[in-house]
Amino acid sequence: MGTCLMCQCSFDDYTSRCRCTYCRMLVLVCRSCESESTVYVCELCQKQGKAESAQLIEIGESKTSLSGAEFNNFCSDLPRVPRGDDPRTSRKLRILCLHGFRQNASSFKGRTASLAKKLKKITEFVFVDAPHELPFIYQTPMFESNENCASSSLPSSPPPPLANCKKKFAWFVAPNFDGSSGVDWKVANGPFDPLQYQQQTAGYDVSLSHLKNIFSREGPFDGILGFSQGAAMAALISALQEELKGEMDFKFVVLCSGFALRMKAMECGPIKCPSLHIFGNEHGKDRQIANQTSKELASLYDGDCSAIVEHDNGHIIPTRSPCIDEIKDFLNGFL
């Protein structure tokens, strides 16, 4: 579950479409907090010290303009608009987007809103749910506090009713997964294991069949973008690109925080599908997928048709320069 930006209660619904005042990224704001404020500052902008300025805007001390430095910072985040006569803007690339483990199409659409905005002149993103529905799991509160995680930020009440929660899905599941999503919350057996993805190796056949149906119903697609476990799924599909011709035709893959599963399809020599690999560098603080893990996935692709973008922003898809410029350069090659 996500948490409300304002009160930190459990919440995971982006349908209110609340956005950060500065970067315009979608943020999670619960129903009660939505009615109390119209100015929101996402976590990244808070870290950059923009929260104080937002408070001034909200109380009316700066309703008409930002300071010069803040205005420049804000403008630097806006997408560059190509000239109207640019032939590359005559069509858009349709990209199928595969979310990560325990996410869904709606949440992934919200998390990539900033990316979609900056690429809106050249891409059309299509979001779909994975086929394996997962049970709702929560961890009991831990009252120990440390320098990095204050106990006050942890949930102190039972999880919200399931009626208020969006279903969560996966492309791969553990071999012992029984397929039941359950009708209530389950307590986690232990703390979150960042290496759990290594045990999630089952369910590929179901996911492949699911995507074949999506290509048939909603295609064609120019490319596939995958994040985390979605990137692992996209990588497997790209390794089978020749075999899937006629059923799943695409030109490229974009693999964000990806990893390679130990499956036969990934061991048949360099993968010839054009690919863009986006992941955190050695100091990127990606606590889910290590830098070396994503590098190993990138090494499986033909170096003549692959590109790598490393960043220092953790387990996300970066949208600032120079990363966004490198992403645009790769995509423009298919227009």
Image: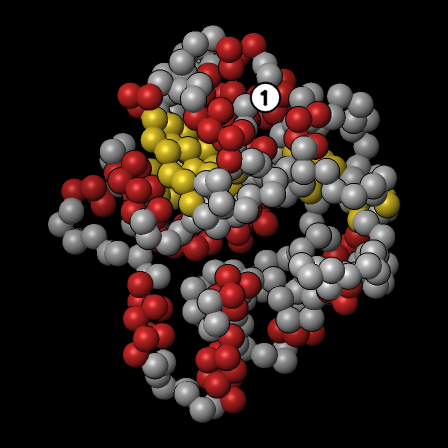
Tell me, yes or no, if residue 217 can be seen here: no
Task: Find residue 136 and report its image quarter.
Answer: top right
Residue 303 falls left or right of residue 99: left
Outermost residue, left side: 85
> Which color scheme does this rendered protein use?
secondary structure
Callout 1 amino acid: Leu
Q: Is mark 1 on a helix, strand or loop?
A: loop
- Residue drawn 44% across and 19% down? 300
Outermost residue, front side: 147
* 3 lies above or below 129: below
Give coordinates of residue 49: x percent, y percent.
Answer: 48, 72
Give coordinates of residue 101: x percent, y percent.
Answer: 64, 37
Give coordinates of residue 234: x percent, y percent.
Answer: 50, 27
Residue 9 falls left or right of residue 186: left
Residue 18 falls left or right of residue 246: right
Quadrant for the C terminus, please: top left
Task: Find residue 5 and report its image quarter.
Answer: bottom right
- Residue drawn 41% across and 16% down? 271
- Residue drawn 33% across and 52% down? 321
Task: Find residue 163 and report its image quarter.
Answer: bottom right
Judge by depth and name the residue closer to the eye, 96 or 214. 96
* 85 lies above or below 22: above
- Residue drawn 67% across and 55% down? 2
Give coordinates of residue 104: x percent, y percent.
Answer: 62, 43
Tell me, yes or no, if residue 74 can be seen here: yes
Category of crowding for the residue at label 1, using alpha-carbon neighbours closer than 10 angstroms: few (below 14), some (14–19), many (at least 20): some
Q: Name the residue under label 1.
A: 261
